[in-house]
Image (spheres, rainbow, N blue to C red):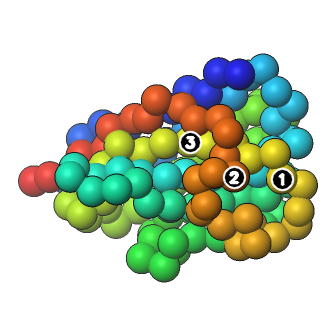
Amino acid sequence: VQVTESGGGSVEPGGSLRLSCTISGLTFDDYAMAWFRQAPGKGREGVAVISWSGGSTYYAGSMKDRFTVSRDNTQNILYLQMNSLKPEDTAIYFCAAANYLGTSAQALGFLESQYPYWGQGTQVTVSS
């Protein structure tokens, strides 16, 4: 299984970025997907989860009004649209897959042990 994130970079506060995650070696729509992030000097935290079908999403409270997670099961791609970025959004962003066919993304949540497949991450830096 290969998980690859892309789309990171440097942006000014208030700007936007769209991250992408491609995955191969498994049946994409058998997996719920999630984004996590790790800021400098901090532990990894959950950002957003999306169910296998895309019909259910769940966000960490501080990001739900600015970030949008989506997926294209025909292309095996996961996205994270990030708007109104803040300096505190600076982090490495990781994509992860969980073999979960439930309909509720919130029920899966951000327990890392539920996600056996991870990418290497993509750096997002928000700075003026």
Labels 1 & 2 near each other (Cβ < 8 A): yes
- Residue that carries the numbered disc 2 in the rendered image: 114
Residue extending furthest left? 128
Dot 2 and dot 3 residues touching (CB under 8 Å): no
Which residue sits at x=40%, y=54%? 44
Q: Which residue is mark 1?
A: 100
Camera-side mark, 1 or 2: 2
Q: Secondary structure at mark 3?
A: strand
* Residue 77 point in image, percent of width and height: 69, 36
Number of residue marks: 3
The tag earlier along the polypeptide, 3 or 1, is: 3
Residue under the point 82% across and 27% down: 26
Labelled disc at residue 95: 3
Q: In x, y percent, where is residue 89?
A: 30, 59
- The amino acid beneath tag 2 is Gln
- In the foreground, 38 or 81: 38
Q: CA distance from mark 2 to mark 3?
A: 13 Å
Q: Which of the marked residues, 2 or 3, is nearer the chain's N terminus?
A: 3
Dot placed on the residue nearer the N-terminal end, 1 or 2 = 1
